[in-house]
Image: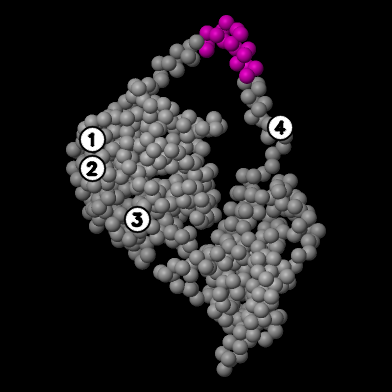
Amino acid sequence: MAGLRDDERAWIRGAQAGSLPDLEALFRDHWTRAYRAAYLVVHDAAAAEDIAQEAFLAAIRTLDRFDSRRPFGPWLHRIVVNRAIDWARARSFRAEVGEPALELAGEAGSGLPYSKPVLAALAEFSPEHRAVIVLRHLLEYTPREISRMLDLPRGTVNSRLRRGLDELAGRLEGGRP
Amino acid sequence: MREQDVRRALLAAAPPGEAAAQRRSWQLARAAFDEREPTPWPQRNARGLLLAAAVVGVVAAVLSPQGRAVISDVRDALATEKVVGVPEARPALFSLPAEGRLLATAPTGPWIVGADGSKRRLGDYDAASWSPRGQHVVASTRSRLVALTPRGKVRWSLARPRVHDARWSPSGFRVAYLSGANLRILAGDGGDDSRVGTALAVAPAWRPVEEHVLAYVDRDQNLTVVETDAARTLWSAAIGPGPLQLEWSADGRRLLAVTSTGGGRFTVTVDDEGGRRLQSLSFPGRFADAAFAPDDHRIALVRQRAGRSELLLVDGDVLRRQQPVFDGAGRFSDIAWSPGGRWLVLGWESADQWLFIRSADVEKIKAVSSLAKQFDPAGTGAGAFPRIEGWCCPG
């Protein structure tokens, strides 16, 4: 995941020079994954939108200082996932708000047998645990990269991934007719 | 189950409203980008070049006889237009005459003034208002809503387009604000942001004694009162175009609405908590500000009229009962009551003064001058008269 494509480097440099089309290309290339990652951690569409939005606004504010030789994605995803964890933790302290059911647009038509059960099972994990799973399986970071992004020991990341996969499998198999 | 299955499932999951969310985010990102777009050298230095050109022009003008005559005329005109204000005003704000803290917004940002006169700038924000017990301030820029401690530390932050008129509920658990023409509400910790409806550009007002009852003016020019948690409209009444201010009395039994009626007049209406219209009266002049007293239904009302301004005390139950409190040349801008209701602070923009007035009988006036300069200590030149946002509880 950490590799940097030439087009991304060109978009960053273009945006730094004031090119709106380059910024748009960068935005379109990264927004969906950022939004989905946030959503899968917080399970709230409005919050996920705010989190992804704020991460991009932070990126734009610091664009002039951003080193175009570095990949943009990890930097953005680190902000997104950590903010999503903070948001989910804060919500858990609010007594008046319950955990909403996970809504999915167009999920029924996806044709993927595991989609809905996997996501429902994911909702059972803690926000921190979800973040590890999302970073690994949606955004495809290595455990080493995840441990750096979340400031966690590598062993913790590995164990959460292993336990996550086992629990997902167990719940899904247990739930099958 | 294999890793690939999890990955495929996660990739297939599109959250609700993803496309609309992306469109909204892009609009905001684009606006933010437009604001920071790098400018070429001549534009970056345009201010300096213009200043240099102006200096050259002024020097040339001063050296010519015609130029000296023009400058003399301008000086005379300025001298005759200058509003002196209250004589012997203090040159600096040394203390407040009553307990509590003032929140004021200058072009340099919002400031909190302590009872001992100490001032703290909260940051680079356009507007601010107190939380109910003064433990926080909700502030905004064009694209951001922020909750701050009185020391300026950010508690939470939310990006939204065209944010303005944020107000914290009396319970502390909700914040209402306008984002463009949308009235939105979020939890006091910054979460659960949701849209209530479309609203005209006047600050919404929370009812003080009841949790989460909010008054606003909807896009059809109706004064509307909603119970926000239940998303239920309690009542709605036509108010007409040009709403200027909404405010509840401290006991929550009166709702004041001020509208501009054109022709140099404005209308004050007072409804009870159930939506029954109790009073409506047209006033000559231009409305500036109004505030209910903290302990009864008296309204301190500031208007401008024929080059002068006036502070009136109006009985909220009988609007024709009015007591003139203070008048002066030029423009009064805003008014606030001290927490105990014994003092009023009046912004006299034309005189660059704040007047602290003890009781409606004006037993005492304490004036402070040079406000614009005091709220621009670095001399950035942004100096303009600070707006009084509220006088809140002791810190």
Q: Which region is colored magenta?
A: B55-71
- Horizontal side of A163 relative to B77 (left or right) equals right
Q: Amino acid at mark 2?
A: Arg
Q: Amino acid at mark 4?
A: Pro
- Horizontal side of B90 relative to B51 (left or right) equals left
Q: Residues within 10 Å of mark 2 (few under 14, many from 20)?
A: many
Mark 3 lies on residue: B170
Mark 2 lies on residue: B298
Compare marks 2 and 4 and give the one earlier in the sequence.
4
Q: Amino acid at mark 1?
A: Ala
Quadrant in which the N terminus of chain B appears = bottom right
Compare marks 1 and 4 and give the one earlier in the sequence.
4
Q: Are marks 1 and 2 on the same chain?
A: yes
Magenta stretch secondary structure, dominant = helix
Q: Are marks 3 and 1 on the same chain?
A: yes
- Tell me the number on the disc at residue B73: none
- Tell me the number on the disc at residue B360: 1
Res A137 → quadrant: bottom right
Compare marks 3 and 4 and give the one earlier in the sequence.
4
